[in-house]
Image: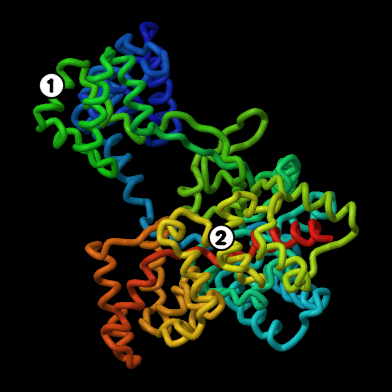
Amino acid sequence: MEIQPYKLNEEGLQEIANEGLLKLSKKYKVKCILTSDSHYGKQEDYDSYLKMHEIHGRDVDDGTYTERYIPTEEELLKRFVKMHPEYKKEAPRMIQNLQDINEKIDEGILEQLPLKLPSVHGDSEKKFKEEIIKGLKEKGKYNKQYIDRCKEEARVIEGLGFIDYFLIVQDYVKWAKSKGIKVGPGRGSVCNCLVSYALDITEVDSVYFDLDFSRFMREDKKKVPDIDLDFETNRRHEVIEYLVEKYKGYSAQVISYGLYKADNLLNDLFKVCGVESVYEKAAIKKFVKDNIDEEIIIYDEVKKKAECRLFDKQYDNIIKHFCKIYKQIKFYGTHAAGIAITGNNLIDYTAIEERAGKLVTTYDLGNLELINVVKFDILGLRTMSTIREFEKETGEYFDYSWCEDPKVLKEFGKGNTDGIFQFESKGAQEILRLIQADCAEDVLAGSALNRPGPLSLRMPEQYGHNKQNLGEVKDSPWFEYAKETYGTIVYQEQIVRICRKIGRYDWSEVDRILKVLKGRGRAIKFRDREIEELRKVFYKGAKAGGYSKEDADRIFSTLLIYSFNKGHAAGYGVVSIKQMYYKVY
């Protein structure tokens, strides 16, 4: 029984509730715990708590919340005894009961949870293998190369316990197609998986595009794979409704949280703290930018600065409020694409709430992953509706011969890509002309190079130069690992190959360098400590392979410039090639 010893209102409703619970606990021999309904961390944060409500136009300064911080055990006991003196002897036991609960929690429980999903078929393993074979035969790819690769991928998928995950995705893709909803060819690293191609989850032949399965899944990396698929934007909700209905009690949409961001929060605080001068606003913004580390904000450190004390004194503790409120949750909504599915009842994993007649998890995507809840992304792409219309009008469906059609490729090379997905802008068209695109690999590279990082580093020019002057680059020590891009390192998959083969990295080191590179479309400064550590390992591996110090340094420096997921480039490249085929013919 949970007892909360604070005053709820003048009528004494909290005291009455406590009395009833305490009597019930005695009668039925149920233990009690003392807790506090805490709305903010420390007693001195009360003014910031009120200020946060003021930003939203709410007045809560009636004294109700003055004690709603996290109290010490002594404070909690004191409040309880004051409210219920007749239970003074039982109070310490109630605190101990709370500690007992804490000690029962297995710290490793989240890692130990097996990944469970509702089984789509009775014998999932048998069905999985049958569907792979069936898919390869239907695609005319039932040969040793494809069978061997699918066997190896299936072994990893089965070993990690993800068979039902794949079958669930296959099921809702099949359902969407049966209802005339166009599904995209795949996006992200799922395109590196040949099994997903065999199961008709994606249209990307990872053998054809030379895509590495390890970028999607590895047996040493126990992480739920991400299968991101695009559906027609205006019919995506039908797929979401199908999943929620099919796995009732095991599924819900996912909550999303919006946080207070620096500029917006400061603008809000200017209004409620009385900052009217444009110059003062600029000065406060400059102080925050120059003196506050946005990753870890410790107000006790910030307030040591004279400017902070001055601003706080003039404007109702404005810097303090910023430090306390920044990155707190401002609002919540429903994630546009995420569906959570569990193997057991959903409420065994996460609290849920009903919103507009639909169930929503109260953990967001990042936290669901920590408790092994599988989320499925049902994404929207308007281009899918266009593709469906083309197919209906022409009766022509994608074939890999389209990727080698001279007429189709010629138009890419000329930059005649008005209306073509990914290549409608003048800049994208200029890149295609610059690299003289004449094969599917060039189309993929064209989209990967049309990003701020490679553009600032003039990589499209480098790519075009290398293509026309292969003799100059064929002798580079990394050329054999970047043949498809003429020695220009464009993709993460190429970096993985080079790190594994030349630097002799183990997989944990590969993961570290990819993590460092993730999201960075620019050159990285070598003073970064982690880069230095990884560079030393690379040198050691390269030396063992007979590479000189100069070559090792040159290769490692090249790796750090830029990288893109080739699987994603292939998935969206297929969409571009499809549209160009329809346009040409």
Which residue is at a point 83% across and 62% down the rendered structure image? Answer: 397
Q: Nearer the viewer, mark 2 or mark 1?
A: 2
**Residue 149 visible in image:** yes
**Mark 2 falls on what kind of element?**
helix
> What element does badge 1 sit on?
helix
Residue 203 in the image, given as x and y percentages of width and height: 72, 65
Determine the residue positioned at 28% across, 84% down: 540
Q: In terms of image quadrants, where is residue 527?
A: bottom left
Residue depicted at x 32% and y 32%: 326
* Residue 279: quadrant of the picture: top left
Q: Amino acid at mark 1?
A: Leu
Q: Alpha-carbon neighbours of circle 2 within 10 Å: few (<14), some, or many (≥20)?
A: many
- Farthest residue, direction bottom: 546
Query: Which one is nearer the viewer's eye here, 285 or 265?
Result: 285
What residue is shown with label 2? 431
Looking at the picture, which amino acid does disc 2 mark? Answer: Ile
Residue 559 spot, x, y in % from top left: 39, 71
| Of residues 534 and 373, the one drawn nearer to the viewer in this rendering | 534
Q: Give how far apart the Cα atoms at labels 2 and 1 are.
A: 53 Å
- Is 129 displayed left or right of 453 in the figure? right
Q: Position of residue 244 (x, y in %)?
A: 69, 44
Q: Which residue corresponds to mark 1?
A: 310
Q: Nearer the viewer, residue 454 or 571?
A: 454
